[in-house]
Amino acid sequence: MTGNLPFEALSVETLATRLGTNEALCAKIGKDASAWKVREVGDGNLNLVFIVEGASGGAIVKQALPYVRLVGDSWPLPLKRSFFEYHALTRQEARAPGSVPEIYYFDEVQALIIMEYLAPPHIILRRALIDGRRLPNIARDIGLFMARTLFRGSDLSMVTKERKADLALFADNVELCDITENLVFSDPYFDAKMNRHTSPQLDGLVAELRADRDLKVEAQRLKHMFAANAETLLHGDLHSGSIMVTDQETRMIDPEFAFYGPMAFDVGMLLANFWMSFFSQRGHEQNGRRDAMRAYLLGVTAETWAVFRAEFSLLWRTERTGMLYQKSLFEDQGDRLGAEQALDNVLHQIWDDLLGFAGIEVHRRILGLAHNADFETIADEDLRASCEAKALKFGRHIAVNRRQIHSIDEVNNLAALIEQENSI
Amino acid sequence: MTGNLPFEALSVETLATRLGTNEALCAKIGKDASAWKVREVGDGNLNLVFIVEGASGGAIVKQALPYVRLVGDSWPLPLKRSFFEYHALTRQEARAPGSVPEIYYFDEVQALIIMEYLAPPHIILRRALIDGRRLPNIARDIGLFMARTLFRGSDLSMVTKERKADLALFADNVELCDITENLVFSDPYFDAKMNRHTSPQLDGLVAELRADRDLKVEAQRLKHMFAANAETLLHGDLHSGSIMVTDQETRMIDPEFAFYGPMAFDVGMLLANFWMSFFSQRGHEQNGRRDAMRAYLLGVTAETWAVFRAEFSLLWRTERTGMLYQKSLFEDQGDRLGAEQALDNVLHQIWDDLLGFAGIEVHRRILGLAHNADFETIADEDLRASCEAKALKFGRHIAVNRRQIHSIDEVNNLAALIEQENSI
């Protein structure tokens, strides 16, 4: 495949022919393309994903389509998202080595990335959590990933000229930002066309939330922050479906929503997905109670946040070379406590905001277009609705009251309290 | 002059030869270039400014230099700032018609803008205020200008795709942002090379401020907001030296610092300059007391903020067509009060932040590189230092305590109280 041909979607049938001479791929999996085994495994909402296995190994071929796969060609979406995914992956690898798949090849015209195949036992984290698996390392690995990428992609660390140039580059990822802006922050709170929810069970609660003025205003304030506060390069879609795990290893994938936004967004979305998993566990108790799993999940949120704080603080003290909170104003004046005071401020702001983003993320996964398998795989609709209702109430509470909540333990106690209620 | 020649600085001697065939200029001031009268009048820190007068009128020719004029060629500064000034002027004219000079011609390579000559009785606002003149319309005109440009340049009004593209364009104005980032937010708070202050009178207070941890942290939080929160297209340097006035008319000039930043920055810098004028009046009482002028200036701050609020609120209710705080969530649901609640939130945020920016702006004009004529023209150093010291204390108070200050009257009462103190 050369860069001169116009974009054409790959298929299981054409992949070996079209990529058979690709040196990077051949070097990785073997030159005999006739022996390649190709499967299409894309289960996300947007793209084609192929696993290609040859004599000497496997690789992932991910290709964007010029529309939203989940919806079809009635919803066009530019191929350039592949460009942003590629650039995000390279930056994440530089800032948090070992946390993302290795890239073998990128073709901008074909909107195609060839990358490391995370073979079984790698599994999507969301799937593992639905299965009730307690992964031992995810809190540490994800906490470190977030602290490192968010800190090192900001003016706390970067040369500001380079950050502004990169910000300008990613500002063109406007269509994917638009998806988040609408689907996450607005659609769930009115009768938008693509919304769906478990009905009629949730109808009453949905009407209540859409009439909830404080909630709507808060969601829009968060949208304002999301759209305007270009603080750092975000993953942009960091949920449990964007993370591959084994018991030992954790890798973040699919950063095509990457852009410069508020640090708290990635952290809030990620934690929201742990809390949703927590509320969904009641729907997966066919083979036994999930009490230990629930306790594990709350522990994971607490540990993720603790690891994030600790690593962010370490980087603050050791790598704060950017133009913000310069050492010339603090440490160089013998004022280490000044730098610590500023750190506390920055972490407090992230905390405040992440609770808002978390609450909104919970809502959009239950009320909007793109639902979570955590809830969707609960076949009994009444049971599912009961889990979802509790999550909705939890999301509302933390979004609206975020400035009055001071610790992750408070949030987890609240989650436990709501989870144990009997009625929706 | 054609666009093909490399950049060359104009001079009084060469201007008529080089621009004698410029159609836009000839159309405005007359074709007989040999009869043109040329004066260089740039009194700012950065550029060449010529007044060219011909048989049928006059024009301003403003040209950037590849360095900072105030400092010399040891401090290079890119010519592209002229490009940003031109684009900012066209956007400001579209968003607040009649508020900026008319543009006749722009040459990117020569970094040159030919524009409307605001002839006498037009005068720089700062000069008029030093002279003790009470301009009747400035609060209204500047309040409207800020509300219209800041609202209409944001996601409250713009198509977000266009705003993101424009944000990317202005992100390249990095060198001028860098000046603000360093000179405004950081240098005043440590022993930076280019700082100066009235010495020895202020030495003690300067040492105190540089040891003031809360102040330093707050200044850096504001810098963080300035650098990251790309909310709207700012003027970026909206002080009383960037405004031309007559008793009837008000025009904003010199937006070469334009970039996407927080709404509160323009408002805070502008109000700070009124407060500095207020504190400087004691130094200009050779020909009589300035009590009425002081009262006028506090009235101007109150009216400017009131006009800003009123116009911003009007635009919120009538022109809120952007993606933020969409009507589909509020008015379209019969929830007008929800939209008002959100408006109150947005205005409150601007208020909170503008006090911070105002306090920091006061400090940098007394402690940093670029001082104000308001204070600089006070020849008696003890008297000047006394005025400056009061302004410094005022700036410190509003920057650090901004979240506990609820109205402009509170701020003005504080200013009056400090101004009447006897000692520095």
Image: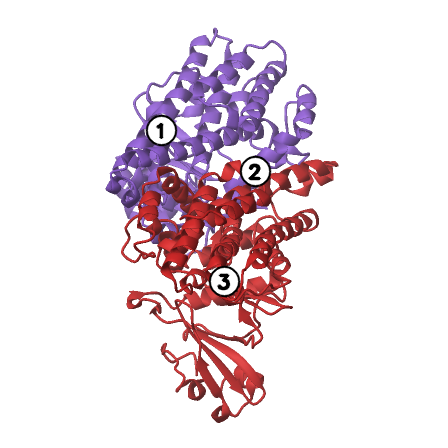
Chain colours: A red, B purple
**Callout 2: chain:** B
| Disc 2 secondary structure class | helix
Callout 1–callout 3 Cβ contact below 8 Å: no
Q: Are marks 1 and 2 on the same chain?
A: yes
Q: Nearer the viewer, mark 1 or mark 3?
A: 3
Residue at mark 1: B308
Q: Amino acid at mark 2?
A: Arg
For the residues labelled 3 and 2, the Cα–Cα distance comes to 48 Å
The one nearer the camera, B241 or B278, is: B278
**Disc sitting over residue A34 in the figure:** none
Dot 3 and dot 2 within a common chain: no
Report the Cα–Cα distance between label 1 and label 2: 24 Å
What is the number of the mark on residue A285? 3
Could you tell me which chain the residue with mark 3 belongs to? A
From the viewer's perspective, is A176 left or right of A398?
Answer: left
> Of helix, strand and loop, which one carries label 1?
helix
Q: Position of residue B23 (x, y in %)?
A: 28, 47
Q: Disc 1 marks which amino acid?
A: Phe
Does residue B169 sit above or below A130 in this rendering?
above
Which residue bears the numbered disc 2?
Answer: B221
Q: CA distance from mark 1 to mark 3?
A: 58 Å
Instruction: Decide if residue B216 is on the left or right side of residue B62.
Output: right
